[in-house]
Image (cartoon, grey):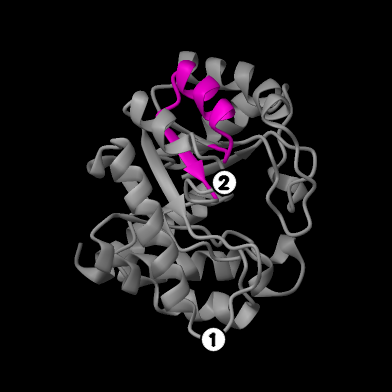
Amino acid sequence: MAIINLTPDSFWQGSRQTDKTYLSAVEKAIRDGAEIIDIGAQSTRPGYTEVSAEEEISRFLVPLKEIKKRFPVLVSVDTYFSAAARAALDCGADMINDVWGLTHDSDMAEVIAKYNAAVCIMHNAHAQLSGDIWGAIEEFLKNSLSLALAAGIDKNKICLDGGIGFAKSREQNFELLNGYEKLSSFGYPLLLGVSRKSMFGGDVKDRLAPTVEATRLAVKKGVMFVRVHDVKENAEAIREASVLNGD
C-alpha cells in the first residue's frame, strides 16, 4: 500500500504531494510494485490539527477521480469522517482506511456497507495505553468488528491494523510490532503501518532501513499489507523475505 499524502503537514515532507506531483507519484508507486494507493487528505501525525470533512473532500476529490481514471489500481482513502468516505466511494474509491476503527463517526460503518466497500479497521485511543496493551487493542478491535458486521460490511472486505504510533509509547510500539501475529487470532488479514515513524528514532530521512526491516518481519508474521512511503525498497524486501520464508 503506497502512501500518497495530499496534505501540507504530514510528518515527512518528502511524502507530501501537490496537484502537480501526485499523478507522477502514483505512477511511480505502481511501477515500483504498489497494489493499493492510499490517499490521505488529513495528517494524523502526533499533535496534528484536525481539518473538516469538507476540507478533506476538497483536497482528495479531483486527485481521486484522476487516479481512478488513469490507473487500473485499487484506491484507499484515509478518513474517519463518514461524509468524506461517502464522497470518496461515490468517486470510485475501493477502501476506507479508518484510523479510528469505525468509532469516531457513528455513520461510517453504514456508509461503507452501503457501497459494499472494503475497510481497514485500525486500533486507536484517546489516551496512551497503560498496562497490558494486548487486552486494550483486542477489545477495541472486537468492538469495531462488531460495528462492521452489524452494519453489513462484507467480512471478506475487512482488514485490521494494530495502530502502531497511535496512543502507544515507543516501547509499546515495538511490543506490538514484535507480537503482531497475535492479531491474526481475529481471522482477518493484517495491515502494518510503520513507515518512517518516530519509533525508529533519529531523523525521518534516515528511517528507511528500519522500515524495510519491519517489512521483512511482517512477511515472517504473515501480514498481508504494509503501508509505506518507499514502495520500491519495501517491495524488494517482501520478495526477498517471501523466498526465505518459503512462500
- Using the rendered image of the protein, determine whether residue 186 is visible from the camera's viewpoint: yes
Q: In the drawing, does residue 76 fall left or right of residue 240? A: right
Identify the residue shown where x is 43% and y is 77%.
Answer: 134
Q: Name the residue under label 1.
A: 131
> Amino acid type of disc 1?
Gly
- SS at circle 1: loop
Instruction: Give the extent of the magenta segment.
Output: 78-99
Pick whichever, 244 or 211, lies toward us: 211
Q: In the drawing, does residue 145 fall left or right of residue 71? A: left
Query: For residue 23, what is the image quadrant?
Result: top right
> Amino acid type of disc 2?
His
- Using the rendered image of the protein, determine whether residue 216 is visible from the camera's viewpoint: no
Residue lying furthest left: 246
Q: Name the residue under label 2.
A: 104
Pick whichever, 173 or 116, lies toward us: 116
Query: For residue 237, what is the image quadrant?
Result: bottom left
Q: In which quarter of the image is the C terminus?
A: bottom left
Identify the residue shown where x is 28% and y is 66%.
Answer: 184
Q: Where is residue 37 in the image (x, y as percent from the top left)?
A: 49, 36
Q: Where is residue 3 in the image (x, y as percent from the top left)?
A: 57, 43
- SS at circle 2: loop
**Residue 78 position (above or below residue 224):** above
**Residue 149 position (above or below residue 92):** below
Identify the residue shown where x is 74% and y is 53%.
Answer: 11
Q: Position of residue 90 (x, y in %)?
A: 47, 16
